[in-house]
Image (cartoon, rainbow, N blue to C red):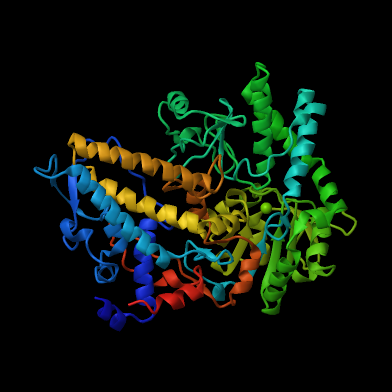
Amino acid sequence: MWQSLREEGTRHEAVPFAVILNHVFTFCSFFAPMATKERRITGVAERTSALSCQRCPFETTFRVSWSKNLLCPWGVGNRVAGCAGNTAPLSTVTSDSGRDMTSWLWGLYKDTKKQTEDLIPLVACNLLDPDAIFANNEMSLEDIEIYGFDYDYTLAFYSKDLHTLIFNIARDILVGEHRYPEGLRAYDYIPDFVIRGLHYDVQKALLMKIDAFHYIQLGTVYRGLHPVSDKEVVAMYEGSHVPLEQMSDFYGKSSHGHTMKQFMDIFSLPEMTLLSCVNDYFMRHNIDYEPVHLYKDVKESIGDVHVKGILYRSVEADIEKYVCYGEQTQAVLRKLADHGKKMFLITNSPFDFVNRGMNYIAGKDWRDLFDVVIVQADKPDFFNDRRKPFRKVNNKGVLLWDRIHELEKGQIYKQGNLYEFLRLTGWRGSKVLYFGDHIYSDLADLTLKHGWRTGAIIPELRSEIKIMNTKEFVDTMTWLQGLTGLLERMQVYRDAESQMVLREWIKEREGMRSKTKNIFNPQFGSLFRTYHNPTYFSRRLSRFADIYMASLSCLLNYDLHHTFFPRRNPLQHEAPVWTDQICAGTLKNPFQAKMAHIE
Ligand SMILES: [Mg+2]
């Protein structure tokens, strides 16, 4: 098999690397398919079929060496994970006459753990490249003629000081203008208390993380600054599933009014934190309050920070404190300009603010880089509402009244709509690539209705990849998946002795699941995963973004002819053996070279 792979593979060195990593990642579940629905180990009384793999007979499964694993098309991952989910069921096993089940199961446990530990040097740390661009959909930069950009958190990246600023101003508006208690001023912004993509139950005043299948991740529900017990959550929601009609849509609306609001904007981090702090204050002081009013007042106060221009004036007054990585953004824009690409900017921010920021980021001649500049566009309505015409803004910020027949380079336009933009520019379809940080407001409509290619800027990727590259995470996640596979197979032994061992394994597994959640954020875990499943955020990201990356600067690592190929992640019914492109781009090259020597 190994030899034939080498002979048949078009990239001889890459094939073994890919096969190994494919199996490793399959059971590590770093890149499990987005449609994977987690199965629960406990309470599966009706599913009592034993699992076996015809190519990996059970009795030999745990006795083969690492080198032999390479010869098996079902691979190490499946072997360690007990061929979980990919194999044909056999008959129920209820007892095992004459065998000491406790010793036998713990023997399997030790063998499996040993095999898992043997794998770890191959999995290695620092495997993932935080500066890579990740693809959900195949896309070649060769085909892209026009590049479009959002401004905030796309061209302009902000320091965490901005979140503190927004929190403090909104908190003071709440106290000063909405007559909330003075005691709220004692609350300071709590960095990293929340993560993006959380849902807030407006009526119950609960913040939580929800997965791609609308299930609440137990252990991530917070009332104020304190967790809510799983028991209470299950009682309140009659389980942990949230019906579709209660979820807000792309535009923050729900058919049932304000029920479950999702926070998708990076600017919403201080808003969620403020909501949590105010809820905490009211509860600690036993104040009877209406959560719906609180939600609206906090939302309005946060909105005022933007609408009243307080945020813009503060940033403009101390731009070096708030705007980061300007030179990298400038390098990207210059690179695109040098290659003759057309560029445009569509932002909801006002011109003075953008102008000040772009002067800082790209120099005073920044407008020469862009063919069209549109400010205060009012996205996402910009992509849907045909009625709003473009309006020209002169250099003094005065709005002009003349009809717009073309979008001229060097001019500034306000509002307008995408349909008019397409008519005036002719920039249609997949030759246009638009970058933004808001999955809904920036990207959803472009993907669903207009066929532009889309790139999501997800700054959190950098810190999450840094964690995923640590030995602690790799060790824990690898053994977690190994133990899960073992549990899936051994659950068929229903005798009391075996079940006692399995309960200990389940307890160990629960501990590791918590650990791999808390390592990202003690309250809410990863932006991308709820334990095994993708989050609601991840599912939307995979649907609306062709590519995604931590920052625009990742483009500097690729030439403008590069094609991004998404990995062919196996579906649940597919054998995980065909992912030769796993070694492309997103993983670090030294590791690839090292793997080429392993036979
Ligand atoms: Mg933005």
Displayed quadrant of residue 65: bottom left
Q: Is residue 272 left or right of residue 172?
A: left
Q: Residue furthest left?
A: 97
- Above or below for 551 versus 34: below
Q: Is residue 4 left or right of residue 388?
A: left
Residue drawn at 40 percent across, 78 percent down: 596
Displayed quadrant of residue 412: bottom right
- Above or below for 440 versus 501: below
Q: Is residue 295 visible?
A: yes
The foreground one among 390 and 307 is 307
Residue 271 image position (x, y, % from top left): 68, 38
Residue 416 image position (x, y, % from top left): 71, 53
Residue drawn at 75 percent across, 48 percent down: 162
Residue 110 image position (x, y, % from top left): 29, 53
Q: Residue furthest bottom?
A: 7
The foreground one among 303 and 250 is 303
Q: Is residue 299 left or right of residue 46?
A: right
The foreground one among 451 and 352 is 352
Residue 561 image position (x, y, % from top left): 56, 78
